[in-house]
Image: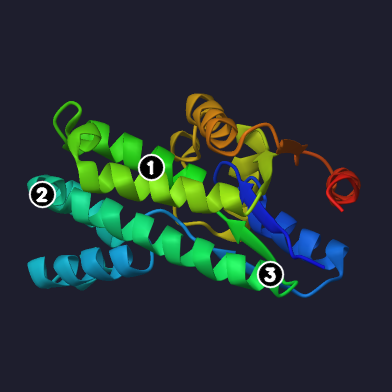
Amino acid sequence: MRGRFIVIDGPIASGKTTIKYMIKELIKEPSIAITQSPYALLTYAITKALATLITKDKKVKEIYPLTYLEMAKPQLLAKILKLLIAMDLLQSIVIATASKIMNLMGINVLIEDYLPTIILDHIEYARLYMEDHELDRDRAIKALYKLSLTLMNMLTPIAIYVHANTKTRLSRSINRGYRIVNPDILHDNLRSKALLTVMRLSMGNNVHVINNNGPLSETRRQLIDIVAKND
């Protein structure tokens, strides 16, 4: 039996990780659960190295490195942003290729914060740190986006958007000890709608919206229905 490729996306603290492992439990087949956040892995290593070189302040070094560059060296961030975007996309391509192999082996891949979230973050950073249409004019970057989206859709993704209101997300953030609990940071309604739009544009109509405001038993019921429909 061929494995499935399941993408879980949604705002910060909406419960994506909980749902990812709940799905893994429900499908009861060989599965791997991973996360690819925007500006992570190799891009994180690059920005971390730069932040470490720029400052010797240990407290500053504890800040997420991309955030530090935004605050301390925005001009430097603008210069390396294309490189960071390219690294993100190359990582997505590697993940999609590996996922295809695992799916053919009958292994399900559950991935959190994948390409739709990454695309949205790229758009937002490009608006802040690039000249108008600079990203659109870069042929290499456009080719990487096209290849990433093509590979993702060849996997026939099952997409799950996790919805939770700001009050619920803020409460969860405080309970889990997140460093930042400002409601404005927790992806406002405009960004949440934009993410859902990007998911639908990039993955077609197979996007399921999960309401994760209530008890986990209700969330589980919704997931059981989705899993059953995609057997």
Q: Give the CA separation, mark 3 to mark 1.
A: 31 Å
Residue receiving disc 1 = 121
**In the image, residue 89 lies at what x, y percent?**
36, 55
Instruction: Say which residue appears at 33% left-offset and 36% top-offset.
Output: 123
Amino acid at circle 3? Leu
Amino acid on which the number 1 mark rests in the picture: Asp
Label 3 Cα crowd, 10 Å radius (few <14 / some 14-19 / many 20+)? some
Which residue is the site of mark 3? 104
Nearer to me, 32 or 187: 32
67 versus 103 height, above or below: above
Which of the 4 quarters of the picture holds residue 213?
Answer: top right
Residue at coordinates 22% horizontally, 42% vertically from top-left? 139
Of residue 142 and residue 167, the one placed in the foreground of this image is 142
Label 1, label 2: how many angstroms apart (C-alpha)? 17 Å
- Name the N-terminal-most of marks 2 and 3: 2
- Left or right of 219 on screen, residue 104: left
- Mark 2: secondary structure: helix
Which residue is disc 2 drawn over? 79
Mark 2: amino acid: Lys
Q: Is residue 99 left or right of residue 48?
A: right
Q: Where residue 90 appears, x then y in whole percent?
A: 35, 61
Instruction: Indicate the secondary structure of the residue bearing disc 1.
Output: helix
Badge 2 density bin: few <14, some 14–19, many ≥20, Cα 10 Å: few
Q: Earlier in the sequence, mark 3 or mark 1?
A: 3
Q: CA distance from mark 2 to mark 3?
A: 40 Å
Q: Nearer the viewer, mark 2 or mark 3?
A: 3
Looking at the rendered image, the quarter that the N terminus falls into is bottom right
Quarter residue 121 falls in: top left
